[in-house]
Image: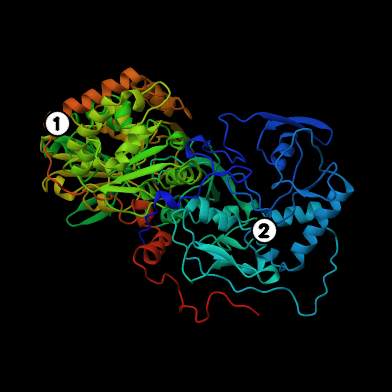
Amino acid sequence: MLRLVSSASRPASTGILGVVAPASSARPGRRTFASTSSRHADITLTVDGKEVTVPQGSALIQACEAAGATIPRFCYHDRLAIAGNCRMCLVEVERSPKPVASCAMPAMPGAKVFTNTPLVHEAREGVMEFLLSNHPLDCPICDQGGECDLQDQSMRYGADRTRFHEITGKRAVEDKDLGPLVKTSMNRCIQCTRCVRFANEVAGVEELGTTGRGNDMQIGMYVEKTMNSELSGNIVDLCPVGALTSKPYAFHARPWELKHTDSVDVMDAVGSNIRVDSRGVIVMRVQPRPNDDVNEEWISDKTRYAYDGLKFQRLTVPLVKQGDRFVHATWEDALAAIAEGLARSGAQGDEIQAVAGALADTESLVALKDLVNRLGSDNLTLDSTGGNAAPIHAVDVRSNYLFNSTIPGVERADAILLVGTNPRHEAAVLNSRIRKSWLHTGLEVGLIGERVDTTYGYDYLGADAKAVADFVAGKGDFAAKFKAAKNPLIIVGSSLAEHPDGAAVYNALAKYVEQNKDKLVTPEWNGFSVLQRAASRPAAYDIGFVPSKKASSVKPKFVYLLNADEVDPKSIPRDAFVVYQGHHGDLGAQLADVCLPAAAYTEKSTTWVNTEGRSQLGRAAVPPPGASREDWKIVRALSEVVGNPLPYDDVLSLRDRMWEISPTLVRYDTTEPTSREVMLAGLKTIIAGTANAQVSGTPLKKPIENFYQTDPISRASVTMAQCTRAFVKGENYGFGEEPSQPQASYA
């Protein structure tokens, strides 16, 4: 449902005395009690006899943590608003008549705080007794067992016996249906409201709430419905008990059985940091890994739940087409068939084409580019609806295709223009940062493109190149707001490069940025960013995996598809010899004459470059199935067979080659900003390359219609298929009848 919220309805930023502060004075990314000064002074207090200094406005629990004290909590979370529900964080403050909730009390200068006194111990024990009095004895069958905050804190702070002897039994609550991803056991709920605050503040789906009071309080939807959010799975991580657990993972494993591997997500170009949990050779679940510079501690539902697609539709042995069907082959036979097909096709020079898909890692891109170049071809392209043409924005300068403001830098912007993009589907975690800034700092947002529900209010400017021209000309209220902004930001969607009017739009925006360079391109701020949606795209541009104008016009006779499953079948001649290298039997495999089985992202240690140009190392959690091999090793073996062996035999030598191409590819976990001079030079290349662009008036469309199925892994996922039925098609995903009783019921 489309929900456009005017700026007048946005919550105002208020100070500690309730005075409304100007939106521009609020500091993004920090929970403040007053927002009237540009800098927060430091205050000093004493915690357990130890002096500690914290920024003014910090909560008492933060001061205690800074002093090294461990404060138990259930409702408090660093990235959510303060609720003060659970009272587990009680501490003793000098001259206070009773214990205080350290999460809700601001740190005061000169205060003396005690976290380890008999009064505090007794208070915590009492809170635990109240919580456990109604808690069911589900630990042996609860998926939260082994990583449950309630278990841990009851062992540390609880008593060894109970005084609860209510003859009517414990409180019972009906389970809620939140959809195919989150399993509810509401008898276990302790009303910490973390899920409610996350849904309202971060996810932007204001559906979860509380009803009733006291013993009758329940959490759920007032009107029965599923939780339609791309970030809903994060409430499973936030829940401190077993009330909200992962439905696809239910009853599959215990945490002590799992091996943990730090890796990087490839479902979009944000590069969210993840932890892959595996047992044996099977990926059991995917969880977020905190990184304030990338994904904070959130991941999208596709990142979290699409892993079951790694078990289905896999290519596990080489396949060679004979007639109209594939037959199994050895690696030697498959590579020999490719060499024979190359010779039989008669392909020379640019008639040899390589196409890379969204899930191609950097090492394999470098290896394939080197091999194709050695065969005399510059016909390198990426699978997209734009065909084989060279990128209209040019890739000689990194700032032409990267998210230059950086991902955390979005929160510094006070005006954002979205052009041809829907960040809610293309980069759900980044979208949550925009919403956070909109809620807390008075951010103004404008949209040119298809109307979408972004989870925050925006000014809709139009859907075509004319709307861009009007904005550039300064027409409309939003253009004036953008002009007056201190840190304005233009976010261009990657699909714009594939649009008929993309060149004209790029030309207009590049000229606008150049004319307003004193605000948009400064040493402190870069206000022109391109949001990529494919994990491989930034690295492909970095290494020059793009065709020359001459090569892009040549009809290929030999086509090599590297994880390319979004390729337009019409772009491949019917008489061309086609090789597909990938891990799933998706569209690319259907077009191929030879299929080579490759490892998926959880089965290889490779480099990924995210949309802001940050190189990150993904690590292998499980071995590849069957005869599958790492992509770059397959290309290296093929180079021997076709008579042009590549000069690297191990991954270290290959990364030396990556260093030669671009040192940023192996400078892991850093972003290197483009200088102002180089950025302006890049804009000039865009302006020059699009000078003769024509306008057709075709509306800009969102590139992703179904968030849950965008690549071979998610298309093979049963869980993502259920999400598609529930959230995209609006069907009943469940395995039984619709519940006959209303969602909320009281005794």
Residue 559 appears at what percent x and percent y?
Answer: 19, 40
Query: Which residue corresponds to mark 1?
Result: 551
Q: CA distance from mark 1 to mark 2?
A: 59 Å
Residue 588 appears at what percent x and percent y?
Answer: 25, 49
Q: Amino acid at mark 1?
A: Ala
Residue 488 appears at what percent x and percent y?
Answer: 37, 33
* Residue found 45% across the figure and 46% down from its top: 435
Q: Residue furthest right?
A: 118
Position of residue 555 relative to residue 77, above or below, is above
Position of residue 43 relative to residue 33, above or below, is above
Q: Amino acid at mark 2?
A: Gly
Left or right position of 53 against 707: right
Is label 2 in a helix, a strand or a loop? loop
User: 16 or 29: nearer the eye?
Assistant: 16
Residue 422 appears at what percent x and percent y?
Answer: 34, 48
Left or right position of 595 against 316: left
Res 28 visible: yes
- Any mark on residue 145, and which? 2
> In the rendered picture of this protein, how many numbered marks are placed on residues?
2
Mark 1 neighbour class, 10 Å CA radius: few under 14, some 14 to 19, many 20 or more: many
Q: Quadrant of the C terminus?
A: bottom right
Q: Quadrant of the N terminus?
A: bottom left
Quarter occupied by residue 229:
bottom left
